[in-house]
Amino acid sequence: MNLFANGANSVVLKAMGRAINKAVTIAEILKRKMPLHQITLLTSSEIIDIYEPLEEGLDVVESKRYVSCMTITLSISSEGLDIENIGYQPPLPFEEIQPGDLNTRHGSEMGSTTKVI
């Protein structure tokens, strides 16, 4: 896979808020293409929004909220990983891995054809 072509041993996906589901989807797709070890870490961050008034005499409004954060580490080998970590997942069994791209781009969708110039 090109992600690991330059000698890197692991890939780290980081996401906050509504982007977490996209990071999980990407991790699951990658894990089904090659055997990868996974460590997932959940945290939260405090976000402070400050609204300054456009008119004089009004107060500055401050809003604090907490946003969920996720870090997913995918690694080719378990070297350097804490496999006792509560967020550790071993690679999928080989029966569940489908290497290669099964998406054929022959323009067969809905009878349409695409001409590339």
Image (cartoon, helix red, strand yellow):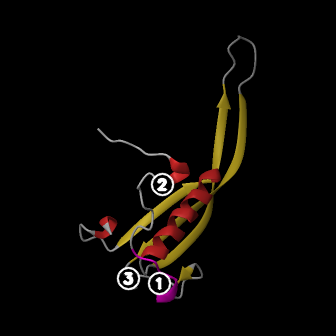
Badge 2 amino acid: Ser
Q: x, y (%) of residue 101?
A: 41, 67
Image height of 117 relative to 22, above or below: above
Instruction: Work out whether residue 72 or residue 34 is closer to the camera in this orientation and state it.
Output: 34
Image height of 102 relative to 114, above or below: below
First in residue order: circle 1 vs circle 2: 1
Q: x, y (%) of residue 115?
A: 36, 41
Label 2: few (<14), some (14–19) or many (≥20) C-alpha neighbours in 10 Å:
few
Badge 1 amino acid: Asp
Q: Which residue is mark 3?
A: 80
Residue 1: image quadrant is: bottom left
Tell whether 75 sits left or right of 6.
Answer: right
| Disc 1 and disc 3 in contact, CB within 8 angstroms | no
Instruction: Work out whether residue 10 or residue 114 is closer to the camera in this orientation and state it.
Output: 114
Q: Which residue is mark 1?
A: 82
Q: Secondary structure at mark 1?
A: loop
Quadrant location of the C terminus? top left
Q: Which residues are magenta?
A: 93-99
| Disc 2 and disc 3 in contact, CB within 8 angstroms | no
Tell whether 107 sits left or right of 61.
Answer: left
